[in-house]
Image (cartoon, rainbow, N blue to C red):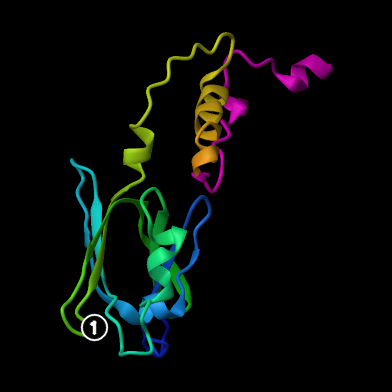
Amino acid sequence: MSAFGNILGVRMNLMLGKGVPIPAPVDALEALEELEIKLFDTAPTGFRMVFSVGRDGPLSLIGPKFIDDERFKPDSRVVVTMIFDIKPTVIFDGVVTKRQYIPGSQSHEGKLILFGHDLTCLLSREEKRVSHMALDETAIANLIILSYASMAIVPSSFHRRDRSSDPHRPDTEAALQ
């Protein structure tokens, strides 16, 4: 927090999309009624989002445009960030697993409910058995991490092992003499 307090306030940012998520449409943010995120350390983390999707009157026969948007369907990526002052912090990163539509009997009573889990549900969908012959641990870890890039899961940085303390590495100063 800055020396003057939190003068910019606290804001939430919602991003959705197949592959790389992009900011949610304004009409969806205006229709968002509830966002519940349950964080667990021993079980999959999940979320529930409730949108009001009722019609306004006789001129809006179709309802909100975002109902048919691909970003609000299962297997879409969801990223929720909270912005304190100017620094965004990721609160949740996951995928939509279930979509439920509840029509209302009057205007603005319809609900679109999205349920989802964190990215661990993507990682547990397939089992891989791969041998890594003649590779060190860092190279193996980097190859495994890169295999998830197709799911738009990319780490912010790769781990680079400090080889200066490796007992099997020849001393470069002694080799130059």
Q: Quadrant of residue 58?
A: bottom left
Can residue 1 be spotted in the picture? no
3 falls in the magenta region: no
17 on left or right of 39? right
Between 159 and 114, which is closer to the camera in this rendering?
Answer: 114
Residue 88 image offset from top left, x and y in percent: 45, 69
Residue located at (30% from left, 83% from top): 55
Judge whether 94 appears above or below 28 on screen.
above
Which secondary structure, mark 1? Answer: loop
Classed neighbour count for the residue bearing mark 1: other residues with Cα under 10 Å, few (<14), some (14–19), many (≥20): some
170 on left or right of 119? right
Q: Amino acid at mark 1?
A: His
Placement of the C terminus among the 4 image quadrants: top right
Residue 122 image offset from top left, x and y in percent: 37, 39
Residue 74 image offset from top left, x and y in percent: 36, 50
* Boundaries of the magenta span: 152-177
85 on left or right of 35? right
